[in-house]
Image (cartoon, helix red, strand yellow):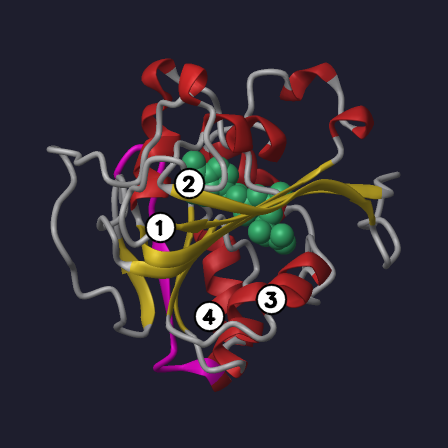
Amino acid sequence: MDEQHWEKRYRSRARLFSGAPNEVLMTEVRGLPPGQALDVGCGEGADARWLAAQGWQVTAVDLSRTALRQAATAGAGSAGQVAWTHGDPTVHPPPAGAFDLVSLQYFPLRRVPGHRALCGLLHAVAPGGTLLFVSHSPAEVGPQYDGYYQPAEVATLLGNGWRVLTDESRPRSGPPPEGTHHTRDTVLRAVRGHRQRAGGPVIRPARRVLDSDERRTDVGGETDRRAPGVRESGTG
Ligand SMILES: C[S@@+](CC[C@H](N)C(=O)[O-])C[C@H]1O[C@@H](n2cnc3c(N)ncnc32)[C@H](O)[C@@H]1O
C-alpha cells in the first residue's frame, strides 16, 4: 500500500470516504484541552477539520496529494489551523514531543524491525499528550493486514512511561464505511507520562520496548509545522 496505491484509490472517485469525522475520534477527544494535533494519514481531512473546529492546531499528513488537495479545498474554512502536509511519517518521523494528540485512524502502520516507524510516531507525543490508534477489528480484515500493527498489539509494547486508558474492541455506532462490512473498531488510547516512573499503572517489562523517556538520536527538533496550505514533508 504505497503512494501509488493510495493515489489510484483517491483518483478513482470524487470522494473515497464519508466526509464525516470518525466517531471514535470525536468520542475520545471531546473534552481534551485543545493543543497541537498530528493526524497521521489524514485522507480527505474530515478528522482534521473537526479537530480544528474544536480549537486544535492540526498537522494533517498523508501520502496522497490528491487526498490532500481535496482536504485543503474542503478545509478552506480551517485555514490557519490545519497544515496539510505531504509526506510519510513512517519514514521521516515527526518532531519528537511536539504533539498533544497523535491520531491514527485506520492508518496502515506496517511492522518493521525494531518498531522503528512506530517509535517515531510514539516519540512525537508530548509528555502528557495522547496517542489514539484506531483500526478495524482484526476479525473483519483479511490476511493482507497481517503485517500491520493492531492497536491491542501496540498496547502490549508500550512501556511504563505510558498509561493505557482504553484498549478494547467496540461496535461502530454508525454504518460501515461504504462498500465494506466493518462493524467493530479496535481502539487504543494512551497517555504519555510526564516522567517515567517505576511501578506505573501499565507495565509489561518483559516486552517493554517503547518507553516514552527513551531518547532518539535521529529525530530532529521542532519544525514550523503550523503553516497552512499543503506543505512538503518527508519524501516529498
Ligand atoms: C484507510 S485511509 C484513512 C484515512 C482517514 N484517516 C480516515 O479515517 O478517513 C489511510 C490513509 O493513510 C494514508 N497513508 C497510508 N500510508 C501512509 C504513509 N506511509 N504515510 C502517509 N500517509 C499514508 C493513505 O493515503 C490514506 O489516506
Q: The magenta stretch spans which residues?
A: 78-92
Counting residues from the start of the chain, the first of labels 4 and 1 encountered is 4
Q: CA distance from mark 2 to mark 1?
A: 9 Å
Question: What is the number of callouts on the image?
Answer: 4
Label 2 neighbour load within 10 Å: few <14, some 14-19, many 20+: few
Element class at badge 2: loop
Counting residues from the start of the chain, the first of labels 2 and 1 encountered is 1
Q: Residue at x 66, y 17 (%)?
A: 144
Disc 4 marks which residue? 72
Between tags 3 and 1, which lies in front? 1
Name the residue type under label 4: Ala
Name the residue type under label 2: Gly
Q: Indicate which disc residue 200 carries.
A: 2
Q: CA distance from mark 2 to mark 4?
A: 41 Å
Q: Horizontal placement of 96 versus 19: left or right?
A: left
Counting residues from the start of the chain, the first of labels 3 and 1 encountered is 3
Element class at badge 3: helix
Q: Indicate which disc residue 46 carries.
A: 3
Circle 3/circle 1 CB separation < 8 Å: no
Residue 173 visible somewhere in the drawing? yes
Name the residue type under label 1: Gly
Q: Disc 3 beta carbon < 8 A from ligand 1?
A: yes
Counting residues from the start of the chain, the first of labels 4 and 3 encountered is 3
Q: Nearer the viewer, residue 154 or 163?
A: 163
Name the residue type under label 3: Ala
Between tags 2 and 4, which lies in front? 2
Q: Indicate which disc residue 68 carries.
A: none
Circle 2/circle 1 CB separation < 8 Å: yes
